[in-house]
Amino acid sequence: MAEGLAELRARIAAACAAAGRDAGEITLIAVTKTFPASDVRLLAGLGLTEIGENRDQEARPKAAECADLPLTWHFVGRLQTNKARAVARYAGVVHSVDRSGLVAALSDAAVRAGRTLRCLVQVSLDEAPPDHERGRGGALPAEVPGLADEIAGAGNLELGGVMAVAPLGADPLPAFARLAGVADEVRRAHPSAAVVSAGMSGDLEQAITCGATHLRVGTALLGGRRAIVR
Ligand SMILES: *Cc1c(COP(=O)(O)O)cnc(C)c1O
C-alpha cells in the first residue's frame, strides 16, 4: 500500500509538472469500496484522511469502525433519496448530487443530523443518446447551474463544486475539458465552489490536465477489486 501510494504521488507530481500546476492543489481521495475497514486504518496510518465509498450499506459500518480516526468520508456513488438520512450521519462530502429531489432529501437529513454536508453536482459527460438512460448518474450539463443554486440555497448544505466520471470507452480528455467548462460556469455564480472531482486510477493524468482538484483513486492504491462496483 505504501508502495502504491508512493507511485501514485509520483504520477500526480509528474502530471502536475506537465500541466504547470502545483501538486499541493490536488486532494487525493482513497476509494476503499470492497476493501475492509482494516485497510482504511492502514491508509490513515500512511497519512491519508479522505476516504471514498460508493454504497451506504458498506460505508456506514466502515465509518463506524473507523470513528476514532480523523477521516472525512466522501460518498461517491449513486445515492437513492431514501439513503440520504443514513449518509448524512457520517459523510462529509457527497459527490453524486444530480437531481432536485436529492438536494431536498440531503438538506433535510443534514438538518436532522445537525451537520453540514458539502455537496458536489455530478455532471454526466456521456454523449446523450436520444433515449438517454443516465445509467451512471449525473445531471446534464445544462441542468448543473440550477442544481448548484439549489444546493447553495439549501439548509445545512454547502456547494463544493462539481464531480464527474469519464464516459466508458471514450477518450477522457475532451470529456474532462467539457467538465472544466461546466465547473467554470458554476464558479462564476459561486466563487467558493472550486472543487473539480475527476480522475480515477486510469485517467488521473487527463483529469489533472483539465483542472481536477480532487482525485478518486481505488485500484492504483489498493489493487484490483474482486467485483467492479460502479
Ligand atoms: C470505484 C470508483 C472510483 C475509483 O476507481 P479506480 O479506477 O479503482 O481508481 C472513483 N470514482 C467512483 C465514482 C468510483 O465508483
Image (cartoon, rainbow, N blue to C red):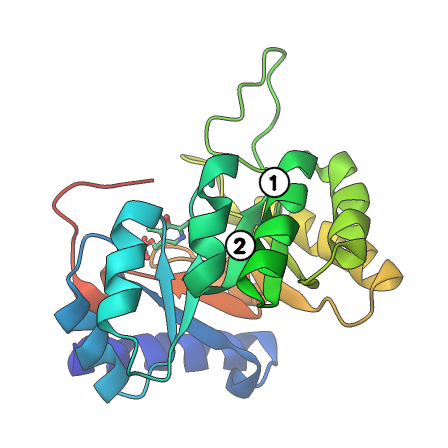
What's the amino acid at mark 1?
Leu
- The answer to whether 150 appears left or right of 26 in the picture is right
- Quadrant of the drawing holding the C terminus: top left
Which residue, as the protein is rendered here, is positioned at the far front? Answer: 112
SS for tag 1?
Answer: helix
- Mark 2 → mark 1, Cα distance in angstroms: 12 Å
Q: Residues within 10 Å of mark 2 (few under 14, many from 20)?
A: many
Residue at left offset 66%, top offset 45%: 103
The residue to which callout 1 is attached is 102
**Closer-to-camera residue (177/157):** 157
User: Where's residue 189, x and y in %?
Assistant: 87, 59
What's the amino acid at mark 2?
His
Residue at left offset 67%, top offset 43%: 104
The residue to which callout 2 is attached is 95
User: Where's residue 36, x and y in %?
Assistant: 15, 62
**Total numbered circles:** 2
User: Where's residue 10, x and y in %?
Assistant: 34, 81
Q: In the picture shown, does residue 143 fall above or below 179?
A: above
**First-in-chain label (2 vs 1):** 2
Q: In the picture shown, does residue 174 fall above or below 20?
A: above
Residue at left offset 61%, top offset 64%: 118
User: Where's residue 138, x and y in %?
Assistant: 58, 38
**Closer-to-camera residue (189/99):** 99
